[in-house]
Image (tube, helix red, strand yellow):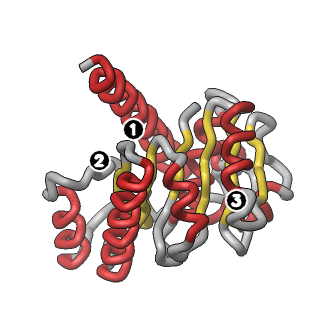
């Protein structure tokens, strides 16, 4: 079953938000587990609030010593496994990446985030050498402005999108009140009251587009792997 890891060695990259959004969206289709490997355990805190989908299981990781067993157990139980890693480079990050079918590298359109994303990409390539297998990955721009972008934001995005060696999500996770509100009021964005949280329709469309592109990438990677094995 697909294991999808969210990794960025810099905190504040939108990693946990995008991981939880995807987990909730996938849980609408199939049973899903999200492993909270962030030492602050923000997903675990969210999971204790009202509104967690019945199809979504939250597993709280304690240390690098247990992460491989947690991934294996979740993969045996549910069709989708999401891992939200800590915001620092670590052995735990390497372990999770080595087990992944797709690594998503969230980043804001800022130079520090871009440098941290490149560090993660280098780590993925080291893990590919260690495991002797291809580990698909893609960068994902988060907390993006839906309207006008600054010149700096455009420049950083262009550096990734025009690099033929780096896969980049077409869709971006925009800065939406609904996405931030999940951690305050609990539940999913579909459960929110449109009279209290603005822009819900656009937030839902953004989320569905993200989920669809993730599924498309998983399918494409699986087909490419099957073709490679036949050849």
Task: Name the residue: 74% across, 40% down.
Answer: 73
Crowd tier of the residue under label 1, counting other residues whose Cα lies within 10 Å: few below 14, some 14–19, many 20 or above: some
Q: Which mark is residue 170?
A: 2
Question: Callout 2: helix, strand or loop?
Answer: loop
Q: Which mark is residue 213?
A: 1
Q: Nearer the viewer, residue 77 or 134?
A: 134
- The picture places residue 102, in percent across and down from the top left corner, at 45, 45
Is residue 201 in view? no
**Which mark is nearer the camera, 3 or 1?**
3
Q: Quadrant of residue 49?
A: bottom right
Is residue 228 in view? yes
Q: Which residue in the protein does label 3 denote? A: 36
Measured Cα–Cα span from mark 3 to mark 1? 23 Å
Measured Cα–Cα span from mark 3 to mark 2? 26 Å
- The picture places residue 35, in percent across and down from the top left corner, at 69, 53
Left or right, residue 205 beside residue 41: left
- Is mark 3 in CB contact (under 8 Å) with mark 1? no
Task: Name the residue: 53% across, 52% down.
Answer: 5
Left or right, residue 45 beside residue 14: right
User: In the image, is residue 68 above or below residue 75?
Assistant: below
Task: Name the residue: 74% across, 58% down.
Answer: 66
Measured Cα–Cα span from mark 2 to mark 1? 8 Å
Q: Quadrant of the N terminus?
A: top right
Q: Nearer the viewer, residue 119 or 159?
A: 119
């Amino acid at each position: 079953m697909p294991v999808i890891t969210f990794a960025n060695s810099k905190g504040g990259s939108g990693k946990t938000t995008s991981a939880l959004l995807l987990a909730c969206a996938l849980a609408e289709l199939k049973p899903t587990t999200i492993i909270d490997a962030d030492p602050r355990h923000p997903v675990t805190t969210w999971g204790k609030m009202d509104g967690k989908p019945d199809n979504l299981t939250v597993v709280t990781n304690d240390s690098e010593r247990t992460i491989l067993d947690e991934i294996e157990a979740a993969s045996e139980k549910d069709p989708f496994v999401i891992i939200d890693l800590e915001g620092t480079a670590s052995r735990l990050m390497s372990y999770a990446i080595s087990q992944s079918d797709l690594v998503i590298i969230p980043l804001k359109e800022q130079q520090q985030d871009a440098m941290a994303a490149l560090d993660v990409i280098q780590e993925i390539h080291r893990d590919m050498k260690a495991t002797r297998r291809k580990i698909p990955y893609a960068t994902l721009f988060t907390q993006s402005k839906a309207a006008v972008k600054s010149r700096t934001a455009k420049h950083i995005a262009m550096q990734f999108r025009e690099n033929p060696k780096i896969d980049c999500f077409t869709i971006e996770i925009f800065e939406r009140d609904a996405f931030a509100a999940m951690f305050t009021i609990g539940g999913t964005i579909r459960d929110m009251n449109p009279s209290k949280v603005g822009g819900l329709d656009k937030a839902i469309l953004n989320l569905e587009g993200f989920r669809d592109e993730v599924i498309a990438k998983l399918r494409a990677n699986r087909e490419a792997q099957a073709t490679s094995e036949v050849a």
